[in-house]
Image (cartoon, grey):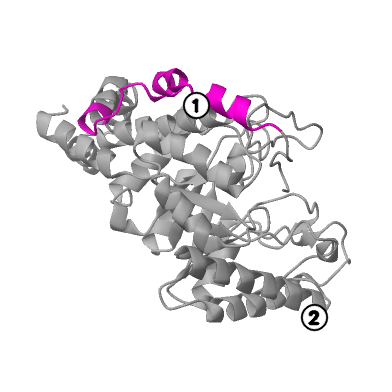
């Protein structure tokens, strides 16, 4: 049974939870076939941050915004960081981009041409400069590198090239900065993806040093993959650096987190809470990585934050003592029932109460809708080029 002490502890933990937002989620983005433009979409990184700040204003737990370079290039990153502070948020992870330059058609860090590899490494050093200017402490790398055909390149040599390039990038970091390496099992390469899974990412970061860890994107796995097992293994090694939360039905759909399989999200958060990795000082960064093609951007991010909060709340309500006792006693159904009791709990009133304790409206979606901000940006953001995927 869940007691008052556990409920109070859950509320305290939820008040401390933070979820980072992606700047690109506020621009026009979506499928490869059509990106539908929406009125009021940001035209530059300053407006992206202003929109992200709205999510934090009504949820209270989204104080950081990830940037994507060169999508979010500005002339003065110090001014952008100050703008973020003025909006009540700050700059979070800096994401590199080595997948939209023609030179990178055959790879970036794995490219057979040393000139192209050097160009890719230099881009990451540029991202490190952005980190210094904005106060960011984390560089996130995702590589689209891979092969479409057998024999196209040496699989082993490509791994060696990536390892060498990552070592150069890691050496360029300041002592208080970190590198996190993302993986994806396919796309855009179809025969071999150079960093396709958590094991490959883990091998690379373990060779670099303690300030290198793995990024887990919930949409980047083969169908049927037990993601919570991956979470548990990376936590055991102290190498889970960050989450990219989203949902997928078929492939890397980048839908709102919890939309496809909320029970999976709960199972993942149960592993996180069991290891204490939900705490702010755990070193694990929770962030969203989503593309909103048909849904309005800011409400979609608010809803995603709420979904993560509710899954976390359920995980915090698992009766850990009862679960451990059932596991020790080999009580299969009893152990499963403990998890299901927590999952079946309607935690929306509890999370709403947490928001009220933080001085916020209990319903962030309704509060944002009533604020008039959506109408304001539609009327003000006329002219200029809307931000979109790849810009």
* Residue span colored magenta: 355-382
At mark 2, the secondary structure is helix
At mark 1, the secondary structure is helix
Horizontally, is 121 left or right of 369 in the view?
right
Name the residue beneath numbered marker 2.
Answer: 114
Check residue 359 for magenta coloring: yes
Q: Position of residue 366 (x, y in %)?
A: 41, 18
Looking at the image, residue 359 lies above or below residue 97:
above
Please tell me how crowded label 1 is: few (under 14), some (14-19), or many (20+) other residues with Cα within 10 Å.
some
Check residue 254 for magenta coloring: no
- Residue 52 seen from this side: yes
Q: Position of residue 25 (x, y in %)?
A: 59, 39
Looking at the image, residue 263 lies above or below residue 143:
above
Give the CA distance from mark 2 to mark 1.
49 Å
The quadrant in which residue 360 appears is top left
Q: Residue at x 85, y 70 (%)?
A: 153
Name the residue beneath numbered marker 1.
Answer: 373
Q: Residue at x 55, y 22 (%)?
A: 375
The quadrant in which residue 161 appears is bottom right
- Give 249 or 54, whichever is nearer the viewer: 54
Q: Position of residue 114 (x, y in %)?
A: 80, 80
């Amino acid at each position: 049974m869940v007691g008052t002490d556990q409920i109070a502890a859950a509320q305290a933990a939820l008040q401390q939870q933070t979820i980072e937002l992606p700047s690109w989620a506020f621009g026009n983005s979506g499928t490869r076939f059509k990106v539908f433009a929406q009125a009021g979409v940001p035209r530059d990184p300053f407006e992206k941050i202003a929109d992200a700040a709205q999510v934090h204003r009504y949820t209270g737990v989204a104080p950081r915004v990830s940037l994507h370079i060169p999508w979010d290039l500005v002339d003065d990153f110090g001014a952008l960081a100050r703008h973020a502070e003025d909006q009540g948020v700050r700059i979070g992870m800096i994401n590199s981009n080595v997948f939209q330059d023609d030179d990178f058609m055959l790879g970036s860090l794995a490219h057979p041409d040393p000139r192209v590899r050097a160009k890719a490494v230099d881009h990451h050093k540029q991202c490190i400069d952005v980190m210094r200017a904005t106060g960011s402490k984390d560089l996130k790398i995702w590589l689209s590198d891979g092969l479409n055909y057998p024999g196209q390149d040496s699989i082993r040599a490509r791994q060696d090239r990536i390892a060498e390039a990552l070592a150069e990038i890691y050496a360029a970091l300041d002592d208080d900065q970190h590198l996190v390496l993302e993986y994806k099992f396919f796309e855009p390469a179809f025969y071999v993806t150079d960093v396709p899974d958590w094991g490959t990412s883990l091998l690379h970061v373990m060779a670099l040093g303690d300030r290198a860890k793995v990024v887990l994107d919930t949409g980047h796995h083969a169908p049927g993959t037990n993601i919570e097992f991956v979470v548990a293994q990376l936590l055991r090694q102290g190498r889970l650096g960050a989450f990219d939360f989203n949902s997928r039905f078929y492939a890397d759909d980048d839908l709102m987190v919890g939309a496809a399989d909320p029970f999976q999200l709960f199972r993942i958060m149960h592993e996180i809470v069991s290891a204490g990795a939900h705490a702010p000082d755990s070193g694990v960064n929770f962030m969203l990585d989503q593309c909103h093609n048909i849904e309005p951007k800011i409400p979609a991010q608010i809803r995603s934050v709420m979904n993560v909060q509710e899954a976390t709340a359920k995980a915090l309500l698992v009766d850990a003592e009862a679960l451990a006792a059932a596991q020790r006693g080999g009580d299969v159904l009893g152990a499963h029932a403990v998890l299901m009791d927590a999952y079946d709990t309607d935690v929306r009133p509890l999370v709403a109460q947490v928001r009220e304790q933080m001085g916020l409206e209990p319903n962030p979606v309704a509060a944002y809708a009533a604020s008039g901000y959506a109408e304001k940006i539609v009327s003000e953001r006329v002219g200029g080029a809307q931000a979109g995927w790849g810009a």
